[in-house]
Amino acid sequence: MDTSNNTIQLDQFLKLMGVTPTGGQAKLMIQGGNVKVNGSVETRRRRQLVSGDEVTVGEQTLKVDFKNF
């Protein structure tokens, strides 16, 4: 997480939020097209997320909020 400009990589976010236990599993989920960012499928694991972005995995949607980190 880069707190200087309030961004976090997609794979790090999934791990931090407990969606996956490892970064490797997050990478596979993302590359497999199982993750959406703001409603669109995202396949870049290093995609930079900003506050307010919504990440959806299956039926679960998580909102990026740096106040919670």
Image: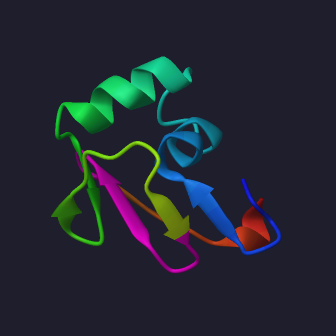
From the top left corner, tell me how far across and down residue 12 is, in percent: 59, 42
Q: Nearer the viewer, residue 3 or 55?
A: 3
Q: Is residue 35 left or right of residue 46?
A: left
From the top left corner, tell me how far across and down residue 57 is, in percent: 30, 46
Residue 29 sits inside the magenta stretch: no
**Start and end of the magenta stretch?**
50-60
Residue 51's image quarter? bottom right
Q: Residue at x 40, y 69 (%)?
A: 54
Toward the right, the furthest residue is 4
Q: Residue at x 77, y 73 (%)?
A: 67
User: Does 37 appear above or below 53?
Assistant: above
User: Does 23 appear above or below 65?
Assistant: above
From the top left corner, tell me how far across and down residue 9 is, in percent: 55, 51
User: Does 60 appear above or below 11?
Assistant: below
Q: Is residue 6 left or right of residue 50?
A: right
Q: Residue at x 77, y 59 (%)?
A: 69
Toward the bottom, the furthest residue is 52
Q: Residue at x 30, y 38 (%)?
A: 30
